[in-house]
Image: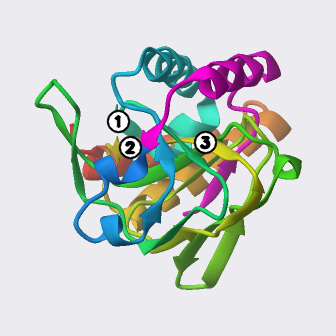
Amino acid sequence: MLLTIPNLLTQDEVLTGRRMLDEADWIHGRVTAGHQAVRVKENEQLPEDHPAARQLGEIVLQALGQNPLFISAALPSRVFPPMFNRYTGGQAFGTHVDTAIRSVAQTGHRIRTDLSATLFFSSPGEYDGGELQIEDNYGVHSVKLPAGHLVLYPASSLHHVTPVTRGARVASFFWIQSMVRDDGARTLLFDLDTAIQRIHADTPNHAASVPLTGVYHNLLRRWAEL
């Protein structure tokens, strides 16, 4: 499942984040690249322990926890602390797949990366290129969203970022361990939840609401790992 979550952050939060990120000191993005990705990764990254990364990360995590669409789609168990990157001057990230297990710095905790997320802090008009291109069974999907919008997609997907030829592409990226690790099962649950919510909105107290809700929770009970 590839899903856009619009307006995860407010415009004030985006502006505050951009101001902090523009004033920050960046390092080369290869410091956190895996064996395969290090050969194709060319960008800048905010150090994980940078005060701006920690402060903005908390803002992002709070927004995620309050977003019903994200919770329904991801069924999150753990969220990796948000990180931040920047592409300028022709920088790009070649085709790669995200590392399956990520360690959280200075904690010893590890998460399984079921879902990848990119949250944009630059608007599309600020830069040329920089499309996130995600491959699945139906082809290649090109993603370039307004600032404050987030894209969620399976971490098992091959993906890349095209060269930024003008301006700066600034974004947050992170991973989610879901309670339901299988993407197909998670998609079925999301579709069912969406249908139930539509029934509630269109026909309150519809006779099918309770049985369908029971099916949803019984499937979640069958598939969830805590």
198 lies left or right of 117:
right
Q: Nearer the viewer, residue 151 or 75?
A: 151
Describe the element under mark 2 as helix, strand or loop.
Answer: strand
Which residue matches tag 2?
Answer: 176
**For the residue carrying disc 2, how many other residues have a C-alpha within 10 Å: few (<14), some (14-19), or many (20+)?**
many
| Residue at which label 1 appears | 80
CB atoms at circles 1 and 2 under 8 Å apart? yes
Could you tell me residue 62's position as x and y percent?
A: 53, 18
Q: Nearer the viewer, mark 1 or mark 2?
A: 1
Tell me which numbered mark, 1 or 3, is placed earlier along the sequence.
1
User: Left or right: 3 with respect to 187?
Assistant: right
Name above or below for residue 166 compared with residue 73: below
Question: Which residue is at 31% across, 56% downward?
Answer: 33
Q: Nearer the viewer, residue 90 or 175?
A: 90
Do the CB atoms of the residues marked 1 and 3 lie less than 8 Å apart? no
Task: Name the side, left or right, on which 186 lies relative to 104.
Answer: right
Give above or below for 131 relative to 173: below
Spatial CA span between label 3 and label 2? 17 Å
Q: Which residue is mark 3?
A: 171
Q: At x 48% / y 17%, what residue is drawn? A: 58
In this rendering, the label closer to the viewer, 1 or 3: 3
Figure disc tally: 3
Question: In the rendered image, which quarter is residue 97 located in?
Answer: bottom left
Q: Earlier in the sequence, mark 1 or mark 2?
A: 1
- Residue drawn 27% across the image and 51% down it: 222
Amino acid of disc 1: Phe
| Amino acid type for the residue under numbered disc 2 | Ile
Is 83 displayed left or right of 101 in the figure? right
